[in-house]
Image (cartoon, rainbow, N blue to C red):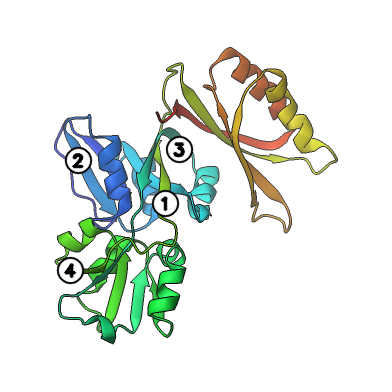
Amino acid sequence: MPILKPKKGKVTVAYLGPEGTFSEQAAKKYFSDRKNVFYFECSTIPEVFEAVEKGKAGYGVVPVENSIEGSVNLTLDLLYQKNLRIAGETTQKIEHNLIVNPKTKGLNIKVIVSHPQAIAQCRKFLAKKFPKARFIEVESTALAVKKLKTLKNAAAIGSIHAAKIYGMKVLAENIGDVKNNLTRFFILAKKDSKPTGNDKTSLMFSLKHEPGALFRFLKPFAEKNINLTKIESRPSKVKPWQYIFLMEFEGHRLDKKCLEALREAKKLCEKLRVLGSYPKQT
């Protein structure tokens, strides 16, 4: 993974590239109040994790959930497998645009290239305008726009920012099926954040396969009046029909009542991993 060496004293932030992705925009939004920030792009989400794991970056920014398409499963799997922490979160508005090489005419488009989620979020527009088009999936919307330099009779779904960076033309703006489209990003680090009094905690766990296990796991949180903000299941990838759970609740893992609830709940788990506590978005 080629990474430029940052100057001494700079905060290093890895993001899913290339330049022009929504991940880059989210990274620069989150760290906008910090000085001396060095940003570098990674080709894949696993590379962002690797950069932070190996100390090549102090922070990594990865997409975790979209308001339309749901969770980014690769990010969830890596959070469970790796020994990194969530130190923050940020949300980025997503606006998809149909982008072409200035030499390409709209009537000649036979190929649509983009990230799988971007294609999925523009289904109605694409079915109506390009019912016979072939789809090519790539790692990011910015990479899709960049590829227009070498593809013929092709269009990409990406941001206006990416179109400007790579010298491409916006053929149609805001083509997403749902206009209120948001993606949530996690800020990865080796340590999570200190308590602020307005925090959120994320964790993943697997339970013993027995009746009432999930109910008993959740009971300590209810008894201590801890508000759960999210819970969902993922295949464990160890045994068929065995699941792990992602859960989020209001409060910091070091708060007394949260600490007590986690201690009680852990007794019922085959595995419990607190992913981190971090300030809630305002």
Residue bearing the label numbered 2: 38
Which sits in the foreground, 42 or 107? 107
Type of amino acid under label 2: Phe
Tell me which amino acid carries mark 3. Answer: Leu
Neighbour class for label 4 at 10 Å: few (<14), some, many (≥20)?
Answer: many
Q: Which residue is mark 1?
A: 181
Callouts 3 and 2 close, C-beta under 8 Å: no
Disc nearer the start of the sequence (3/4) = 3
Q: Is residue 36 visible?
A: yes
3 vs 2, front mark: 2
Instruction: Specify which label sits upstream in the sequence, 4 or 2.
Output: 2
Disc 1 is placed on an element classified as loop
Question: Badge 3 is on which residue?
Answer: 84
Q: Residue at x 48, y 49 (%)?
A: 67
User: CB atoms at circles 3 and 1 under 8 Å apart?
Assistant: no
Q: Quadrant of residue 54?
A: top left
Percent x, y of residue 120: 46, 65
Q: Secondary structure at mark 4?
A: loop
> Label 4 belongs to which residue?
168
